[in-house]
Amino acid sequence: MLSHCRFRALQVFDSWRLASSVSNPGFYTFAIVTDDPPPEIAIAGHYRCIIPVKSENIDAWLNPELGNLAAASAILDDRKWPFYEYQLAQQAA
């Protein structure tokens, strides 16, 4: 079991959408962009990790040039992974 050591807010790439159907009047869906994890996350047993967005890329991500996938990919590739710390929680006796 992992215990949280420190908290630092991250800005992440996400997407919200209101979905509806004939039998359901509507519900919100959410997606977040992930990638392979850095080593300290992989060793903890996770196979995906959120992609943090740099502050200077937020406007370009929120206001994309439609059809310019190269620009979107460049934003996703321009990241600085934080170092994630964790410690094993003590088991109750």
Image (cartoon, rainbow, N blue to C red):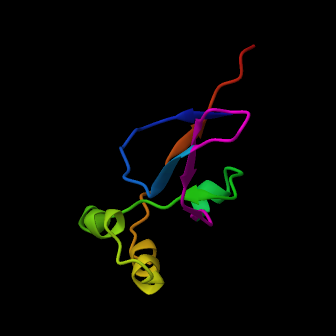
Residue 24 position, x and y percent, is 68, 33
**Does residue 45 lie above or below 53 as drawn?**
above
Q: Residue at x 43, y 76 (%)?
A: 72
Of 39 and 31, the residue lying toward us? 31
Q: Is residue 84 visible?
A: no
Q: Is residue 55 left or right of residue 22?
A: left
Q: Residue at x 60, y 35 (%)?
A: 26
8 or 22: which is nearer to us? 22
Res 87 → quadrant = top right
Question: Farthest residue in the front direction?
Answer: 22
**Is the residue 79 above or below the residue 18 in the image?**
below
* Image point (62%, 32%), residue name: 25
- Residue 38 picture location, percent across and down: 57, 64
Vertical placement of residue 2 versus 90, above or below: below
- The correct choice, above or below, for 47 with respect to 68 in the image is above
Residue 13 in picture, x, y percent from top left? 44, 58
Residue 88 in sight in this render: yes
Q: Is residue 36 magenta?
A: yes
Give the magenta-colored segment's residue range: 19-38
Give the image location of residue 35, x and y in percent: 59, 66
Q: Residue at x 44, y 63 (%)?
A: 81
* The quadrant where residue 47 appears: bottom right
Residue 62 among magenta residues? no
Q: Quadrant of the N terminus?
A: top right
Q: Nearer the viewer, residue 49 or 27?
A: 27
Report the number of discs. 0
Question: 63 left or right of 73?
Answer: left
Where's the C terminus, which quadrant?
A: top right
